[in-house]
Each structure stands twice: as C-alpha cells, then as structure tokens.
Image (cartoon, rainbow, N blue to C red):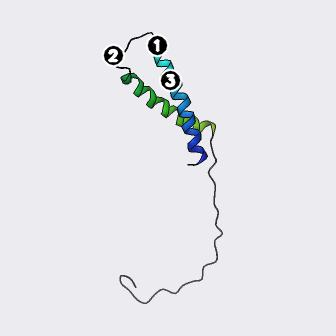
Amino acid sequence: MNPASIRRFVFTLITGYLAIFGVQQLPYEFENQWLVLIPVLIVVYIITVWLDGVFFKSDPVEISVKSSKRTEQKPSSKKGFGA
C-alpha cells in the first residue's frame, strides 16, 4: 500500500467515526439505525476522497522524451497485409 492509500484510510476512519457519533447524538429514535448510517458513511467517504484531493493535491509529473532524428525510410514496394 502506498502512503496516499494509508492516509486516505486513516482519514476515512476518523471522519466515519465522527459521522457515526454524530448520528447517535441525534434526538431521534430510528427503527433501523443502519438505514441512516449506510448513506451517511457513503457520503462521508465521498467527501473524504474529495477533501484528500483538495488538501494533498499532487501535481502530475510531466515526462518529456527527446525525439531523435528519424532516418527516412523508403516506402515498401510490397503491398498487402503483413508486408
């Protein structure tokens, strides 16, 4: 695992815990708490990935290749597939 995956995993654990704690602090009684927690955790994951991209933005690496001079090739006199 690379460091970005570990960082995102830890960030998701922390925000997920805070989301679960926040849902449990609501003054409502839910028949099935999982029907509330699953969408909340999905939204938390989406926000976490977005925030990870905002805070830890890495610039794409540009790879430049020097073009070498090509020798001019004579057109093949053979015609057809695989010639």
Residue 41 point in image, percent of width and height: 45, 29
For marks 2 and 1, the one nearer the N-term is: 1
Question: Dot 1: within a 10 Å radius of its alpha carbon, few (fewer than 14), some, or many (20 or more) residues?
Answer: few
Q: Tell me if 70 is positioned left or right of 45 in this view.
A: right
Residue 27 position by quadrant: top left
Residue designated by label 3: 19
The residue depicted at 41 percent of the width and 27 percent of the height is 39
The residue depicted at 39 percent of the width and 22 percent of the height is 36
64 relative to 80, above or below = above
The residue depicted at 59 percent of the width and 44 percent of the height is 4
Q: Residue furthest bottom?
A: 77
Question: Dot 2: within a 10 Å radius of its alpha carbon, few (fewer than 14), some, or many (20 or more) residues?
Answer: few
- The amino acid beneath tag 2 is Glu
Q: Secondary structure at mark 3?
A: helix
Q: Tell me if 2 is positioned left or right of 42 in this view.
A: right
- The amino acid beneath tag 3 is Ala
Q: CA gap, disc 3 to disc 1? A: 11 Å
Q: CA gap, disc 2 to disc 3? A: 18 Å
Residue 53 point in image, percent of width and height: 58, 39
Residue designated by label 2: 31
Residue 40 position by quadrant: top left
- Asked if labels 3 and 2 touch by Cβ distance under 8 angstroms, the answer is no
Residue 63 position by quadrant: bottom right
Q: How many marks?
A: 3
Q: CA gap, disc 2 to disc 1? A: 13 Å
Residue designated by label 1: 26
Q: Secondary structure at mark 1?
A: loop
Q: Nearer the viewer, residue 71 or 57?
A: 57
Residue 32 point in image, percent of width and height: 34, 19
Q: Residue furthest top?
A: 27
Residue 48 point in image, percent of width and height: 53, 33
